[in-house]
Amino acid sequence: MSSTAELVQTIVGKHGTRREHLLPILQDLAKEQRYVTEDAMIEVARALDLSAAEVYGTASFYTFLEPVPTGEHVIRICKTITCYMKGKDEVIKAIEDHLRVKLGGTTTDGKFSFFAANCIGWCHEGPAMLIDDKVYTKLTPKKAIDAINEY
Amino acid sequence: MVLDRETKLKKLKEHQTKVNMIFQDQDCGQMLDKCLSMSPDEIIAEVTESGLKGRGGAGFPTGLKWKFAAEQKSDVKYVICNADEGEPGTFKDRQILEEQAAKVFAGMAICSRAVNASEGIIYLRGEYNYLRPRLQEELDAFNKKLKEKGFKFSIIIKSGSGAYVCGEETALIESLEGYRGEPRNKPPYPVSHGYMNKPTVVNNVETLVYCAMIIRMGNKEFLQLGTKDSRGAKVFSVSGDADVEGIYELELGMTIREFVDLFGDGDTKAVQVGGSSGHCVPRRDFEKTIIGFEGVPTGGSMMLFNSSRSMYHVLHNYLEFFCEESCGQCTPCRVGSQQLLRGIEAIKKGEKPPEYLNELKKLAETMKVAAKCGLGQSVPNPFLSIVNNFYEEIIF
Ligand SMILES: Cc1cc2nc3c(=O)[nH]c(=O)nc-3n(C[C@H](O)[C@H](O)[C@H](O)COP(=O)(O)O)c2cc1C
Ligand code: SF4
């Protein structure tokens, strides 16, 4: 059995095979594999007795489950107006220069993807970003780069 | 009169001594005991008489929602806590869950007794995943306590995955059932056909905490606060060009003027009340606009803009948000949002004459009535209020 099939089997075993288990399964897969791969979706479809298209259709609806390859760590910087007002653009520029990647892209070494996100709920301490699940607030260009260097 | 920051903070403290329900520590065991000493009807009556309306944005009377759910005959019923908090400018539910999670759980347990529900689900937005381990720990302890006290009710946590529309209650239910978060037609409402097609109460985090406090203390204190249409207090998330930012619980019914005097930087030209999907109030209307269901309702988001800000830019940011977050299910919203965005861009660039704005306004009016859910229906709120009040900034 391939490693993907094994992983899917473990995760499905943990959650169950009913339709309402699909999202928790995909969420765990995204955590383990960084993003939900095509092979994994096919395996999940088999395990839950759904069509692969159905699984893809559900995953692709959700920003955090999008079946597109991403880096090892995902940076999501908030692009809401309040973060903009606190200087989000300078932070984006600094990160772009530091990682040598444009917003929306993934570094060549595959370590970071750099995305924009809608409000992440830290408007009073903007600019704010997430690296994976961790929150960074009151960013300056320097603070943002220091944060990235932790990884 | 422009107050300095110190004076503002002092005044806010005074407000806080008057209103402190959400962040006040409480013994949740006692709350549960009090709840057990009351019959379901008594609980519903207490909440109904408090006049509490939902704090998630739509403002539906909470007591009535519970009553509808209680009247349903079903072997299984659900209580869902809506912790999806995606509205730009809102961050109060996060703070409540960080500081007072047990009171949120208690609110759900009280609701379960009122409507006879057996399962509770917290739908936590994916952006708040970092909260989950700690929440789960607190929840395990709470579930144990529920069992000890004889509740036939337990609560689980489910995560969202980054879709604003999943805050809409029927989209949230679709998402919990493992589908794309596409809103359903209403009616039927979740109180009769909710999660797994069973009667379901969906309430906002803050609403549930007020319920817990109302049961704990009786509804007298709550009734003394606010106005006839907007009882009680509310947690506000303040951001933007503000001297004082953050989360504050305040009595409902203040005017925007009073609010701006407390929080603004002395040069506030507009306040966006209720986030991207809310209304923009310009300076000349500050005195006459009341924060509450009789004036501008809000889920808590208050964004302040001073005169250095371009309202075109603000509107552009909101419209981009809707274009991305529309679930795409219905045409008025999917295409309408994009056309509004392209439309103001075209006017700005001079590709369309200023009169084109009238066409866009008509489109916005159509979206109000033709969009399927609250997302598409509320795109016209920021659009019309910004375009009508800041016409010059949009066309020049
Ligand atoms: C697009 C959209 C997003 C929403 N997002 C939220 C949300 O994040 N949190 C919330 O409590 N209610 C949200 N609502 C309102 C819910 O549909 C529902 O009315 C609310 O959860 C009911 O709880 P309440 O009566 O306690 O306010 C949203 C509605 C719409 C149309
Ligand atoms: S109004 Fe928008 S979000 Fe709501 S159902 Fe229609 S397309 Fe989806």
Image: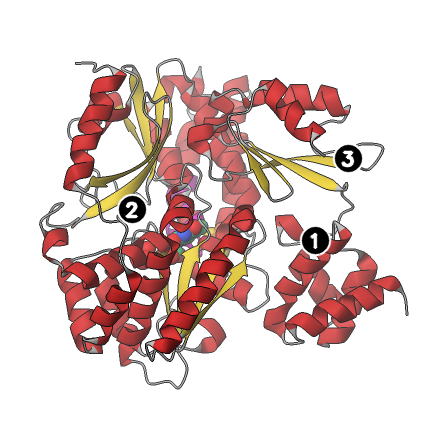
Give the quadrant of the C terminus of chain A: top right
Majority SS type along the magenta span? helix
Q: Which residues are magenta?
A: B362-375
Name the residue nearer the viewer: B267 or B385: B267
Distance from the alpha carbon under mark 1 to that under mark 3: 17 Å
- Would you say the residues marked 1 and 2 are in contact, meaning their CB atoms lie under 8 Å apart? no
Q: Is residue B235 above or below residue B219?
A: above
Q: Nearer the viewer, mark 2 or mark 3?
A: 2
Residue that carries the numbered disc 2 in the rendered image: B23
Distance from the alpha carbon under mark 2 to that under mark 3: 41 Å
Crowd tier of the residue under label 1, counting other residues whose Cα lies within 10 Å: few below 14, some 14–19, many 20 or above: some
Q: Nearer the viewer, mark 1 or mark 3?
A: 1
Mark linked to residue A106? 3
Taking the image as shown, residue B74 lies to the left or right of residue B49, namely right
Q: Amino acid at mark 2?
A: Phe
Distance from the alpha carbon under mark 1 to that under mark 2: 33 Å
Residue drawn at x 42%, y 30% as measured from the top left: A124
Q: Amino acid at mark 1?
A: Lys
Residue that carries the numbered disc 1 in the rendered image: A31
On the same chain, marks 1 and 3? The answer is yes
Quadrant of the rendered image holding ligand 1:
bottom left
Name the residue nearer the viewer: B74 or B330: B74
SS state under label 3: loop
On the same chain, marks 2 and 3? The answer is no
How far across and down, in percent of the image, does residue B341 sit?
52, 33
Does the beta carbon of the residue at mark 2 sit less than 8 Å from ligand 1?
no
Q: Chain of mark 1?
A: A
Does the segment drawn in magenta span residue B363? yes
